Amino acid sequence: MTPPQVVVVMGVSGTGKTTVGRLLADELAVAYAEADSFHPPANIAKMSAGTPLDDADREPWLDAIAAWARERVEHAGAATSSPYGVRGVRGVVSCSALKRAYRDRLRGAGPGVFFLHLDGPPELITERLGGRQGHFMPRTLLDSQYADLQPLQADEAGVVLSVAEDPESIVRKAVTALERAAGADNGSGQATG
Ligand SMILES: Nc1ncnc2c1ncn2[C@@H]1O[C@H](COP(=O)(O)OP(=O)(O)OP(=O)(O)O)[C@@H](O)[C@H]1O
Ligand SMILES: O=C(O)[C@H](O)[C@@H](O)[C@H](O)[C@H](O)CO
């Protein structure tokens, strides 16, 4: 199994993809990207108006993110200064990646795409979204996010992490899972956090 090279922090809106993704990228001293920066204005306008995106809206967006990920790996400089055993990681991107077909598109970036699925119950995520100010994504779209969500499967390189703890604790578990995957000898790349 290829050690993790690009980490995708996935999950429904409000699970903390941006919060955890930024912290993790800082901890690993690698590049960070927020998937929303790859949306065309039409997608942002659609969500802001309370309409869920569909597959056609998301496919070019996912391809742009995959291109970013491929660039990280293909033009990787010297190993990062990360103090952890995850020196192969070259970037972190926060992206909902709700469906397996979406993750397949992102895996097109190369063999080392590793998913951190931030998982939490709707009532907790609703509460988190209620505390967030000034973001375009309406809470009313949370149901559609769960409806589209196809949880990470056991054959997909990645780990499912509960969001019922503080961001720093989640990042520590993510680093442990990445180190395990980097040294995985069972070929599955699966870790449990
Ligand atoms: N582990 C956590 N514990 C408590 N609050 C959190 C945690 N993670 C994120 N938050 C808070 O929850 C809200 C949503 O977090 P964030 O914007 O990172 O989620 P997201 O998954 O990126 O959302 P979206 O997909 O809509 O961009 C924010 O107000 C953030 O400060
Ligand atoms: O796939 C989608 O439905 C969208 O990309 C959402 O994930 C939003 O981008 C995000 O929740 C807002 O930041």
Image (tube, helix red, strand yellow):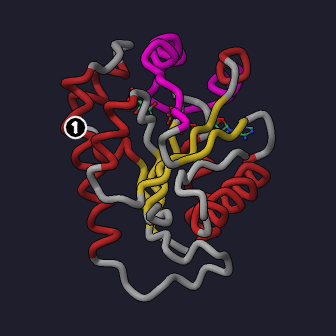
Decide: is 44 above or below 81: above
Residue at x 60% of width, y 64% of height: 185
Residue at x 43% of width, y 42% of height: 95
- Is 109 contained in the magenta span? no
**Whole-percent x and y of residue 140?**
50, 11
Q: Residue lying at the far bottom in this picture: please name it.
A: 78
Question: Is 172 positioned to the left or the right of 87 in the image?
Answer: right
Q: Residue lying at the far front in this picture: please name it.
A: 186
Element at label 1: loop
Mark 1, other Cα within 10 Å: few <14 / some 14–19 / many ≥20: few
Question: On the image, which quarter does residue 53 sit in?
Answer: top left
* Residue 29 or residue 46, whichever sits in front: 29
**Whole-percent x and y of residue 115?**
51, 47
Decide: is 27 above or below 61: below
Question: On the image, which quarter does residue 43 sit in?
Answer: top left
Q: Which residues are magenta?
A: 127-154
* Residue 89 or residue 95, whichever sits in front: 89
Quadrant of the displayed image that contains ligand 2: top left
**Whole-percent x and y of residue 106?**
32, 46
- Is 139 contained in the magenta span? yes
Give, as a three-letter code, the residue at label 1: Pro
Decide: is 139 above or below 67: above
Residue at x 73% of width, y 49% of height: 170
Question: Is 166 positioned to the left or the right of 17 in the image?
Answer: right
Residue at x 58% of width, y 30% of height: 14
* Residue 169 or residue 138, whichever sits in front: 169
**Whole-percent x and y of residue 129?**
62, 25
Residue corresponding to mark 1: 40
